[in-house]
Image (cartoon, rainbow, N blue to C red):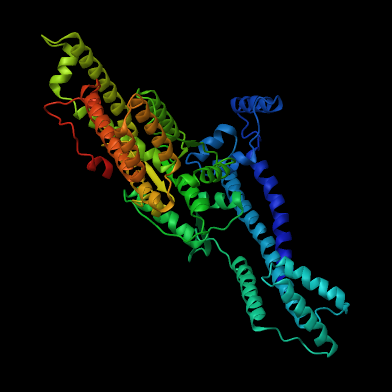
Amino acid sequence: MECIQKLRTLGASDEKLLQQLCGSVLKNVNHFENPSADIRKTEKWLRYQLGLSSKAISTVSFEWICSALLSANKDKEMDAVNPFLSDAQKVQYNSELVLLMLLCNRSHFIEQAILALQSVLSFVQLLCLLRGASVSAQKSSPREEEEQIQSLARFFSLEVQPDALEAILKERRQAAAAQKLLPLQEEVQRTLIERLKQLTSAALDLLTAKRHYVQVSEDMTSSVLSIELDPRFLLFEFLFNIVLRARQVEMVNWFVSNIRGGNSRVQQMIMGQGKTTVVGPLLALILADGEHTVLQVMPTALLEQTRSILRRCFGVVLVKHIYSIQFDRNCSEDTTDVELLYQKLTSAEEDRSVVVAAPECVKSLFLKSIEQMHIIETVSTEEMEEGLGGADGADERQLTHAHQMAKKVIQRSNVADTITPILQLWKRGVLIMDEVDVLLHPLRSELNFPIGARYPIDLSGPRWRLPMHLIDAIFYMQQGRPSEDVQKMLTSQVDLNYSNTADGEGNGNNDKTETEEDNPHLDRLSNVRTVIQQGFEERALQRRAASGAAGYGLLRTKTAPRARPLAAAVAL
């Protein structure tokens, strides 16, 4: 109780000081005293006062003051909004603003620490009530104490079954009648002890919390303390009422130092330690400096959540646009979509904004560029010259085909040239990957992006119907009937055979019918043979169509064979 009382006293003192600082900061920034007796400066000052009175010039808001704390040209920006501030006033308002943020953040954690200590006291009260000990000078009735026990058990979400709690209350009544303390069961004791450890640990963490980005040094000659801190960390804590953990500050500083040194690094944090909500936004805040593009990539399932977190972080005071980019191989073959994507990325870099994307988007853009260059390589120089300049002795059909091929190759080349600046932009930028173990896993994060000429699969259609027919023959011998699909096919085949032999008469036909009835599997094997034969015929037609089709993807050239190696493209 004494600790809680001291915390309340400290919180009241901080709140009173906060009110004074808030008014003082706004007053100092919006201070417009005539700095000199010079007539020109006085005239300028009077014009400024008239602008304020007519609301042509607005006063500086507290949000603007906080955001200006992160500016590298803070003094110039302050002179632009208030040219009559002296250097001493600027130093004073900076010191007061930092102190205001520190006190405001500490005031919030004082309230949290008081609530944590009250939870510990309430849990100790629950333990006393469970054993039948008195917790106050005023004696309560047994019914009131039991209601209080049930209320506290629900409040702390104890993993105790209702039947077990009722049994404890029953034993408590018996122990109270005998004027003895109730001994609790070992399982109940373990549950209560674990819960008490959690509550006390949370309270101690709040009471012993400190800022890990503040460096205090003392000048031995003048006995003056010198305090250095990163205002970006301070403003982040102030906006979201948090205290950065040592691990978070260490990780952010480590990443920033390595990235500026041109090194790629990977770090591991357990779930719930603030990778997405703290480390990611802080890295985006520090690294988005107007010279590098910051791209955050995360699994597709986390894309919407991460985008919402970033918009919440950079929606007020720390204002940054959050751009989402999408790209896949189904985009149009012209350069319009790629040019719009490049404009968005360039705008994000200049505005110090953050870009979020799914891994499929980044992979598709890389593979799209590879696909364009692969298609260009499959066309020989002779064919390009024939398509652009024409050839003697070529018929009209060949010339038309060559012109179309040359047009498509030029179009592909333009797309590849448009993608190249985006890749260069990313090369000098920063890529932040969340859940890197998933993004870089070769099986859990793969993109099916086949390139090259497309040819139909051998026996496409019959090749996956044939196994089903063979399996159906086995089940037919067990069940005595084929499946529904096979029955329909057999019915149509029987009708066809009946129509072909409708004019036939004689004992020979009767003998054949009796043979088919005695050996139904012969008819089934005949159908299987028919399916295989149809498959080979379809495949032959497909090969003829593929060899004679017009298009740059199916051309057979002397310099580029028809079957291109696809292993390298798939590996990329």
Q: Position of residue 414 (x, y in %)?
A: 29, 23
Residue 66 figure quarter = top right
Q: Position of residue 500 (x, y in %)?
A: 33, 26
**Residue sitting at 62 percent across and 50 percent down?**
96
> How many numbered marks does the figure carry?
0
Residue 428 visible in the displayed image? no
Residue sticking out furthest to the front: 507
Q: Nearer the viewer, residue 533 or 558?
A: 533
Residue 343 visible in the displayed image? yes
**Residue sitting at 68 percent across and 70 percent down?**
158
Q: Position of residue 522 (x, y in %)?
A: 30, 43
Residue 75 vertical placement versus 334 (above, below):
below
Q: Position of residue 422 (x, y in %)?
A: 34, 33
Residue 102 figure quarter = bottom right
Q: Nearer the viewer, residue 388 or 524?
A: 524
- Is residue 143 found left or right of 45 in the rendered image? right
Q: Nearer the viewer, residue 479 or 116?
A: 479
**Residue sitting at 26 percent across and 28 percent down?**
542
